[in-house]
Image: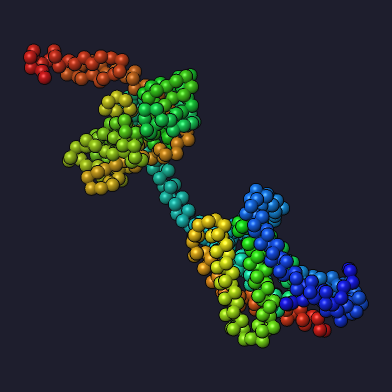
Amino acid sequence: MPDPHPPRWEHDTETQLTSRQRLDRTARHLLPSVFTALVIIFFSAPVNIPGSAELLPAIVINTVFFWSVWRPSGMPSLAVFLLGLFMDLVGFTPLGVSAFILLLVHGIGGYARFGLMRMNFLVVWCLFGLVGAAAAALQWALACLFRLHLLDPAPAFFEALLCIGVYPLLSATFSWFLHILDEKDTP
Amino acid sequence: MVPVSIQVRQALSKLVLPVLLLMSVGIIIAGQADRPLADKARMRVADVLAPLWSLLSRTQTDSERLVHGLKEARNLAEENHRLSAENANLRRWYEVAVSLARENDTLKTELHWVPEPTPAFVTGRVVADSGGIYARAVLLVAGTSSGVQTGNIALAANGLAGRVTEVGTHAARILLINDIASRLPVELESSHAAAIMVGDNSPLPRLLYYSQDTRPIEGERVVTSDQAGAFPSGIPIGNVHYLHPGQPVVQPFARLDRLTMLRVFDFGQSEIEPPEAPGHVPLTRPHRALTLPFKTLLGPGQEG
């Protein structure tokens, strides 16, 4: 279980941080959430990007999973919950469904993070593929449940594929970003 | 912040995720139970985000326009070349047209040509695809107060549209040429052969009763004929098209399914009274009884 709060031993040094550094740290912690919120706003806007309805959950699931595994302080549970709720509000999924699914993804990522961090990229990708497919299937199942009839599973399948396909790209981008942040941390 | 021990804080942080999961399940159930509330919440969020979305979509349209403009600019030279060639061609035709008009004028003067009267017309807006007894008829906002009379001819922008069948003070019903009740004498322009154009409620009226040695040619122009005296000759109707071999139809120039304005012409056909001549069969007019001159010509007991 990731600890969203800084450990106790950091507490003493934190008081000596300047306001600028504190601002910097806050921004750094908020950044993944803000990025995800912007992605949600962008993809829910009436821009005609092909497959945007499936791409949005795929990107959000990717982002949540990545940050839950590699930097849980950037993606606390509360932020995941709020992002999911926001996605439900701007989208047309039943209210709370995305929040539930994202929290599950976040929980799995946080639970398995120490195991995952030691693994090869390809293995992580495969495991994430399972998580993404499960998330898409769950979303489809819940949608079927609430509409009380069997929906076409093709979009869910497409979403799962997008989820798996987008992972390397987003993972590389976020890794690069983490690298920059870490470099800045240790001048 | 309330000072709590490390253990309590860790326990609390472990509790956050399950609590949030439970909350999301609760929200799912609440959202299903009270849909109006969920919709209201959705609308409020959408209201807040609307300016952002409009900004995004405007940016997108702007960039699309920019890309389109760049593409246009690339084709500009080619387009320019084509247009100047076309312009030269048109200029040549303009000269031809001017000289022909002049020649026509000269010839008419030579022949002491009686000029045709310019037909009076009114323009009206089509307000309804009215039902009535016809399947293809429109109602026009122009009636007897504007000088429209039964039997007048309605033209769309580029071709015949129909005929005025009923007229009120402020409205007139126009029977379109593709109605099943519409039967018009027409002329095939290249062969000057006569035919009858019969509407069948489809967009393409059929051509019937053409003579077998002058069949309609694909693409040939069809114009009105003055045979029955209802129409002046030469009003463009459409082009001949063969749907199947042996089944010519007319593709009307007027877009009969989306008429917005119609001009109603009074060609004054009803005033033209042909002089009586022996053997001439007078045309049926609704207000005149048909008097056949055969009786006088044929011997008694020979008719019928």
Q: Is residue A112 visible?
A: yes
Residue A45 vs residue B205: left or right? right
B26 shown above or below B6: above
Question: Total number of numbered labels?
Answer: 0
Residue B223 position in % (x across, y down): 32, 35
Out of A151 and B222, give the one closest to the viewer: A151
Residue drawn at x 59%, y 83% as measured from the top left: A123
Residue drawn at x 65%, y 68% as measured from the top left: A102
Residue drawn at x 89%, y 69% as measured from the top left: B2
Out of B12 and B208, give the one closest to the viewer: B12
Residue B169 position in % (x across, y down): 47, 19
Q: Quadrant of residue B116?
A: top left
Q: Is residue B221 visible?
A: no
Residue B94 vs residue A168: left or right? left
A61 shown above or below A12: above
Out of A41 and B9, give the one closest to the viewer: B9
Residue B194 position in % (x across, y down): 24, 34
Residue at the right extreme, as displayed: A16
Residue A40 vs residue B153: left or right? right
Q: Quadrant of residue B188?
A: top left
Residue B225 position in % (x across, y down): 29, 31
Quadrant placement of the N terminus of chain B: bottom right
Out of B1 and A65, give the one closest to the viewer: B1
Quadrant placement of the C terminus of chain B: top left
Residue B193 vs residue B297: left or right? right
B189 shown above or below B153: below
Residue drawn at x 61%, y 81% as measured from the top left: A124
